Image (cartoon, grey):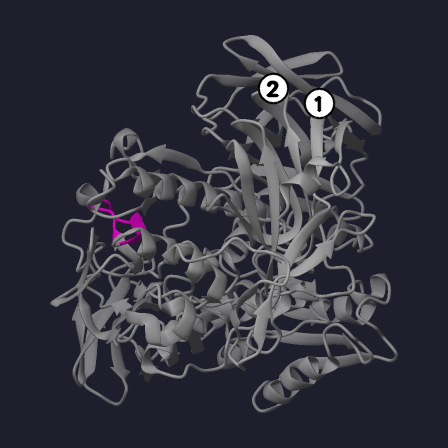
Amino acid sequence: MNIDFFKSGIAMSLLALLIPGIAQAQSVYQFKEGLILKKVHRYGREALYSDALAVQMYRGTLKAPVEGGIFGSDGDGTVMKWEKSVADSAGRFGGAGYWGNGYLYLTYPSDGPKVALLNVQGNNAVYVNGAIHFGDPYQSGWMYIPVQLKKGTNEFYVRGQYSSARLLFPSKQIMLNVEDPTVSNIIQGAGNKNLKAAVVVINTGSSDLKDLSIRTTVAGSEVLSRLPAVSGMMSRKVAFSFDAGNVQSTGKVLCRIELLRDGKVIDDNKVELECVSSTDKYMSTFESGIDGSLQYYAVSPQAGGVVKGSSLFFSVHGAGVEAIGQAKAYQAKDWGTLVAPTNRRPRGFNWEDWGRLDALEVLNIARSRFDPDPDRVYLTGHSMGGHGTWFLGATYPGNWASIAPCAGYPTLKGYGSADGLIPDQGASAIEQVLLRSSNQSDVPALATNYKPFGVYINHGDADPVVSVDYARQMKKILAEFHPDFSYYEYPGGSHWYGSESVDWKPLFEFFKWHKRLADTAVNIIDFKTASPGISSTYRWASVVQQEHPLEYSRLILKRDKSAGVINGSTVNVRVLKLALSDFGSGKKVTVVLDSLNALTYTAKGSTDTLVLRKSGNSWAISAAASLSEKGPHRYGTFKEPFSKKMIFVYGTRGSREENEWSINKARYDAEAWYYRGNGAVDVIADKDYSESRYAGRNVIIYGNASTNGAYNRLLKGCPVQVSRNSVKAGSREWSGDDLGTYFIWPLKDTNANSVAVIGGSGLKGMKAAEANQYFAGASGFPDFMIFSLDMLSTGGKGVKAAGFYNNEWALGEDAVFN
């Protein structure tokens, strides 16, 4: 790229603008010209990814791009060249020339070292002078990333499509950004003394900030809130309290926010709040147990006021839709309250992974807050929320009286959405075990779980976004076994044909006809799960352990309470737990499973449970499985540790380059977690970690035993080990500096916490582990995965080992080696 061209001011302009949401003026450098390389990478909903440019960058062989320069050739032998691209009037590169699966190369000539805020829209990631940062794939606009520029030419490799890019040069080190608030509505007449909201604090300094607070003023009432630490060269969304007790009238209300350091105001801004009538739809915030961040849910109140024992309608939104927008699509019902969770973001996680956990958190809040009839809880949703309805309905069949997916696709194997498809099958045993990690997302495989409740399928027959063929697919599957489902195609209906797309009267009439049976009335169970760590229990039976993790387990059981008999069959179940409360104290119970040996047990009381363990061709009564073993409390996979208020721990004991990789990778994951999950996470150095200070929290380790000081304290006894130039798995060992790893391990001296390791045997291997596809909804990652940098070129052939620990957290037959 010609630096003199940039200096001429023809391609870029240096402007002084007021950036919305950031209080003070910024100098803005808008990128106007760059180079594009097409079809060079593939990232999706799986652990495997390919990226020919990243391979060259990681190996140190990437040449500075020039117009017409040859990069190489693709798989078909077509020569790949860098092409000139000029931004359109909106600053976007690409225009009509789609460059998905490609890179945009930009440069910025700096007259000296300086810090800037990078704002790129439409990208998935960006390398800034070799350091990776997250992007803004949905062009939200509020993603500002602190970056350190060097004197001379600064290089930006933007991965994505239709991107625009600019640099902002801040006049302050610490700033408030209110473009992406999480807020609670003020409910007229509800008190409103202790409400919460959240905004972003940007720290462009190199040091962590631990002495910040926010003072809010609403209608004359002040509240001071202490803030968590904001790491150096990062932003963090922080929650704070406000007092709206003086607000009496409906309408817009300004909340003044002052950011204080050591008691002195260093920045200020405003957030617009809204006071709504008690009969209006509203937003309410809560602290998430996943990461301690502030999230919200939306409510459409019951007409006439909440009545204890009424119905609860749980509605999950589509891609790009806010929860409050979902709630506003419904007319108030006089027989129940409608609650809409967020999935953590309008796109979030497709209602899987942390979207699923968000839904469960909000469902529990709704049950506690509105006290509905537990047998009249109904699940519905539209588009991505239609998928969420299929998925949550199949995963937690004991929660619902009826479900109603609208314009929904059943599985991400058939409908990929923004992050692509989950592949149907792998080309090798390694690839098969990787895909097995996504089994919990395969709704058709779990379809028999719909048996206990009614299903209403609603779909426009002219839907161009989610084809009606998906509804017909599920209709055909249900017709094979389901006694109680209704199917409707709206004539001429597109993807969204007005509020009737979700608020469809026959759908709610169908709900009215259905009531969940009490557990005491359910004597036949047919339950299937892919993982006890995700879904273990239906009614009075629980799968505690599987014989083969993440393969499907199934229980088909029948009980006769008067005769004191439970019999049936199991598939892929090692430990089973049965609740005996309905038999009564002193009742002798005989259990026969899989036509094997009969077991007799005398029930001891109303809370008694019977634990059974299978060994070979017999079942035996057993003590409860040890919490040190796998179970619903801690089961894997690698993605599991990203919960329970996890902390990111980067290494400081390696070389300068290794330490830089570690902190940059932790920042990258924190950026991704914020963007995808509206989340917040503590990012700390290994020397600052202690088990007592961070008790009860999961840990994510970046680096290896040689570079991260917390590694050896937390990974003792793990059969997978990574250190400089070596990775081991049991008795096998691989050498070299190009090996990457992802793996989980139980956190020592805890019953439920775990640690994940993202690392490598050297810089090449660490960089190969940079892609955080684990944050893509429903992507499959097993308990452990060992791979070389070659994976980015050869796919599954570059994976050395992958699989699952057995129930004692040891390597066994579910570990696969290349």
Task: For the C terminus, give its image quadrant.
Answer: bottom left
Q: Is residue 600 among the parts visible in the rendering?
A: yes
- Which range is magenta? 746-760
Q: Is residue 784 left or right of residue 529?
A: left
* Residue occupied by mark 2: 172
Rendered view: 259 above or below 482? above
Comparing 622 with 144, the one in front is: 144
Crowdedness near tag 1: few (<14), some (14–19) or many (≥20) residues, C-alpha within 10 Å: some
User: Residue 790: percent from the left, percent from the top?
Assistant: 35, 68
User: Residue 457: percent from the left, percent from the top?
Assistant: 70, 76
Residue appearing at x 61%, y 23% in the figure: 175
Rendered view: 273 above or below 803? above
Residue appearing at x 32%, y 81% in the figure: 429
Rendered view: 320 above or below 155? below
The numbered disc on residue 631 is: none
* Residue occupied by mark 1: 23
Comparing 67 with 775, the one in front is: 67
Looking at the rendering, which quadrant does residue 725 occupy?
A: bottom left
Comparing 415 with 753, the one in front is: 415
Looking at the rendering, which quadrant does residue 115 occupy?
A: top right
Residue appearing at x 76%, y 66% in the figure: 508
Residue 754: within the magenta?
yes
User: Residue 527: percent from the left, percent from the top?
Assistant: 44, 76
Residue 425: within the magenta?
no
Q: What type is the residue that disc 2 sits on?
A: Lys
Q: Is residue 730 left or right of residue 697?
A: left
